[in-house]
Amino acid sequence: MRILNYGSLNLDYVYQVPHILRGGETLAASQRDIFFGGKGLNQSVALARAGAEVCHAGCIGEDGTAMRDYLRENGVDTAYISVTEGSSGHTIIQVEGSAQNCILLWGGANRRQERTKIDRVLENFGEGDFLLLQNEINEIPYMMEQAHCRGMHIALNPSPIDEQLMHFPLELADYLLLNEIEGNAFTGETKPEIILEKLKERYPRMKVLLTLGSDGCMYWDGSRIFRQGIYPVKAVDTTAAGDTFTGYFLAGILEGRPTEEILRRSAKAAGIAVSRQGAAPSIPTADEL
Ligand code: RIB
């Protein structure tokens, strides 16, 4: 059983600011760093650092080959990453004193996935393998349909949320990993219990992990609901905390660990990520837990 993460790779330009910019305002940043990120890349790093065997597929521009090297150095199989014309995806991230962030995303090469290439990648996977997707690349509905035909398990992290997502074949997803804002967009509800209830009703065979920020998370595994709190830390930068949770969670599922243990480990890993700067560099290894 292998996991294929078909996902984004972004160069994150991270600016430390006294507060997040308001419309019409000009503000000097006190520091700028460039990190490797993208929900896809972060989740592959988290999976690999958690001990899973992970293949990453996606597109970068000529300016993004260091991201492919970084994944490789972290033990990710990068054979399915292709270099396309034009620039890679990038983000402008503002981080304010309270560790809160806001992210402006430019899709770049992430939005240049082509069906012929997708077919060639998926040919190498089949029954029982996992396909992990986030919402930062194009052609997700096609990938879901093709993976489903091949008997793959589909795990979808519908982030960032947008109007198009509502038209995805969500019923094909075996795992939905989302936060409360995304849960609200799908169901119109704000109470976590009701969000889960509505999702269960609509997609009866789906397992749902709902993360709730400082309130931890809830997980519906198809037969019961589990709850897990957070491990409180001094927050420095919340970027990639959700990606860390997702990677550790799925690695635990692949390893067949007990659910309580999976959730505990994922919460610990996300806590460590929040206590450090940057996206991918903040993700801990399993030994650090
Ligand atoms: O989830 C965090 C990630 O979101 C960042 O690394 C950034 O690239 C955006 O995709």
Image: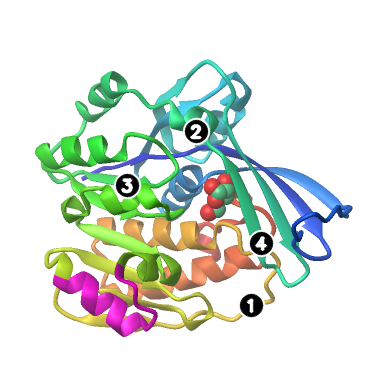
| Most frequent secondary structure within the magenta stretch | helix
Which one is in front, 232 or 11? 11
Q: Nearer the viewer, mark 3 or mark 1?
A: 3
From this view, report whether residue 129 is shown above or below residue 279: above
Q: Which badge, 3 or 1, is on the more N-terminal residue?
A: 3
Residue 244 lies, in percent from the top left, at 48, 59
Element carrying mark 3: strand
Residue at image x 36%, y 71%? Answer: 210
Determine the CA span between mark 1 and mark 4: 17 Å
Beta carbon of the mark 3 residue lies under 8 A of ligand 1: no
For label 2, the crowd category at 10 Å Cα-Cα, with few meaning under 14, some 14 to 19 and many 20 or more, is some
Residue 264 quadrant: bottom left
Indicate the amino acid at tag 2: Arg
Determine the CA span between mark 2 and mark 4: 28 Å
- Say which residue label 3 marks: 132
Q: Do the CB atoms of the residues marked 1 and 2 lie less than 8 Å apart?
A: no
Determine the CA span between mark 3 and mark 1: 28 Å
Q: Nearer the viewer, mark 3 or mark 4?
A: 4
Residue 133 lies, in percent from the top left, at 34, 46
Q: Nearer the viewer, mark 1 or mark 2?
A: 1
Q: Which badge, 1 or 4, is on the more N-terminal residue?
A: 4
Residue at image x 45%, y 44%? Answer: 40
Element carrying mark 2: helix
- Say which residue label 2 marks: 72
Q: Which badge, 3 or 2, is on the more N-terminal residue?
A: 2
Q: Which badge, 2 or 4, is on the more N-terminal residue?
A: 2
State which region is magenta. 187-201
Residue 221 visible in rendering: no
Residue 5 lies, in percent from the top left, at 36, 41
- Say which residue label 1 marks: 233
Indicate the amino acid at tag 1: Val
- Say which residue label 4 marks: 101
